[in-house]
Amino acid sequence: MRFAPVLAVALVAATARADEEPNPAEQSVSRKDQGEHLAAERVATTRKLDDTSTKHAALTVATYTDSDNVTVFTPSLAASIENILQGASLKGRYIVDVVSAASADIVATASPRWTEVRHAGSLEGTYKPHNFGVTIAGSISSEPDYLSFGVGSEMTLDLFEKNTTFVAGFGYGHDTVGRCGAEGSPANPGPSCTSFGVFSRVVNRTSFNFGWTQLLGPSTVSALVLDVGLENGDQSKPYRYVPMFSSSVAANVPNGAPVEFVTANRVPERPLEQTPLAKRRLSLTGRLAHRFEGSTLKLEERLYIDTWALFASTTDARWIFDAGKRVGIWPHARFHGQKGVSFWKRAYVSGDAPAWDIPVFRTGDRELGPLWTVTGGGGLYFYLGSDTNPQKARLSISVDGIYTSFLDDLYITQRSGVISSVTLEVEL
């Protein structure tokens, strides 16, 4: 389509000479002029395309620590090239998680503090020259006892002068769960890891997402996203042992019963965790963002339910205030509440030996039990670029405090923690 004016000129010229004898010299000059014109147009187009592409790089360092003796250190590096050839973009990310833990659950199994490193990477490509776009993405994550990879695709369609956007996506993930270290202890990157060929569990995850984004005005945008997930495989933790109690004792086990109480009152049998081999999950997320004269308000609400009967609601709010040409600051608040899964028990009951009569489904994962969490904090950003283009570089800092109340659990009744991050983004 870029060469249509040139072709039109050539067609008009040819029509004007239709009744005349062609002049070879004129034809030669005409072809030369056309060739130079096309070459100049190609050069101009190439320069224009080069000018529209942007390259970004970001380095983030995040940390997490809590009162249950868990710490996480997470550096990550991200890079992107956008608007290549007027519609294509490529994004990549690499993450390292260094986890160290000596939580109450680990103490209950008489295991020492352990440290584990996870490496993860992702790559995403998008092509959207006009109103329709396609994204293809892939990811991989590796730990000494866990290997995961995933692929996915998403399609977007803009309508009504890009005031409305529809999104539909599909994803597939394949997880291989192994085991390392001595019995009852988490992963050890040494030679004690069992190969996947000797012991492993496979979990397959399939997901679908459907989204709708709508501009409600020049300063307001809303979005609604539906996520559907199908998970098949044994998701039980191969290191988690679940204490059992007699029926007479179970009724008297207090919330947050300490390790000493559990050790003294449980029955000898202590089976591994066992959860259902399939899960179907559904979540609906609504988002609203509004730009005021000197600030931006972002609101989000997420509802979640699955076939394990876990129901959860998460509300998130962030209000970003402009504090000058180069500085922005925001408070952040989040509340999450959930009902536990259908097979959740504070104290599981087992029969007498030798039958024991262990419950079919049992878990010690308190994240599957009833709880509520409140998060509060904030952050700020600085633009570090030149006076003519201050947004060429940006430094962001955020700190949030987290408090969780466990309503029906062993060992602990509450957990407090701090999560922080520092991000440096640069346009190259």
Image: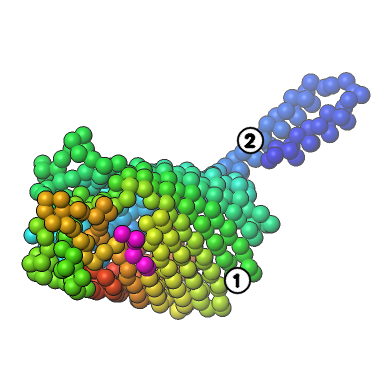
Q: Which image quarter is the C terminus in?
A: bottom left
Q: Which residue in the structure is indicated by mark 2? A: 39
Q: Secondary structure at mark 1?
A: loop
Does the image show residue 251? yes
Residue 380 found in image quarter: bottom left
Magenta: main secondary structure: loop
Q: Earlier in the sequence, mark 1 or mark 2?
A: 2
Residue beneath the point at 74% across and 24% down: 28
Q: Position of residue 153 (x, y in %)?
A: 48, 44
Residue beneath the point at 8% across and 60% down: 110
Residue 60 belongs to the span the image colors magenta: no
Residue 190 found in image quarter: top left
Q: Is residue 344 above or below residue 379?
A: above
Count the marks. Answer: 2
Q: Which image quarter is the N terminus in?
A: top right
* Residue 362 in the figure: left or right of residue 106: right
Residue beneath the point at 39% across and 73% down: 335
Magenta span = 338-343
Q: Which residue in the structure is indicated by mark 1? A: 219
The amino acid type found where label 1 is placed reads: Ser
* Residue 223 in the figure: left or right of residue 140: right
Residue beneath the point at 34% across and 61% down: 341
Q: Position of residue 340 (x, y in %)?
A: 34, 65
Depth check, front residue: 140 or 242: 242
Does the image show residue 57? no
Q: CA distance from mark 1 to mark 2?
A: 43 Å
